[in-house]
Amino acid sequence: MSNFLDSINPFFLVSLGAVIGACLRSESLDYLEYLFKKRYFGTALVNSIATLFLVISTSYFSNPAILNDFQSFWLFFCVGFLGSLSTFSTFILDLFSLMRYRKLKDFFLLLFTSISGAIFFAYLGLYLANA
């Protein structure tokens, strides 16, 4: 599979990963909005899960020999897919909307859950990667 990915232009790999990540994010947020009744909880959860996979991937690919062999996969999965799945702009837009409509309790709840969730999942990813 690596040989196939190596034959593809890096810009296309990142773009393809980003399109897939954005589609999955959109579908996930729609489902999670139904589940949580508030869209921004879905944003926090999706960002946290993407953080988990990014930390595990980064731990795995921190070995230069492995990264050299799987650089195309890194571009597709970590940069494109996970980067698009965990967009910071959605988080900021959700915070801005809550602040604009003076929902300060929800604003601080989203801020706290997003940051603490990301930190928790980052540590979980490090633990799983080193287990």
Image (cartoon, rainbow, N blue to C red):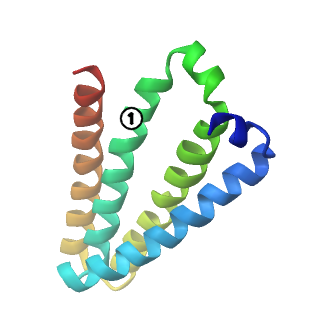
Residue at left 61%, top 59%?
A: 18
Is residue 69 visible in the rendered image? The answer is: yes
Q: Residue at x 60, y 39 (%)?
A: 73
Q: Quadrant of residue 120?
A: top left
Name the foreground residue: 106 vs 70. Answer: 70
Amino acid bearing label 1: Val
Position of the C terminus by quadrant: top left
Category of crowding for the residue at label 1, using alpha-carbon neighbours closer than 10 angstroms: few (below 14), some (14–19), many (at least 20) = many
Residue sitting at x 45%, y 65%: 92
**Is 32 situated left or right of 1 in this image?**
left
Query: SS class of the residue under badge 1?
Result: helix
The answer to whether 56 is drawn above or below residue 93 in the figure is above
115 relative position to 21: left or right? left
- In depth, the one of 92 and 7 nearer the eye is 7
Whether 23 is drawn above or below 16: the answer is below
Residue 97 placement (x, y as % from top left): 40, 79
Q: How many marks?
A: 1
Residue 65 position within the rendered picture, expressed as x and y whole percent measured from the top left:
59, 13
The reply, left or right, for residue 131 in relation to residue 8 is left
Indicate the quadrant containing the N terminus: top left, top right, bottom left or bottom right.
Answer: top right
Q: Nearer the viewer, residue 27 or 72?
A: 72
Asked if residue 99 can be seen in this view, the reply is no
| Rendered view: 115 above or below 66 | below
Residue 114, image quadrant: bottom left
Seen from the viewer's position, the closer of residues 2 and 70 is 2
Q: How far across and down, in percent of the image, does residue 54 sit?
A: 42, 40
Q: Name the residue tied to disc 1.
A: 55
At horizontal 59% and vertical 23% (from top left) the residue drawn is: 67
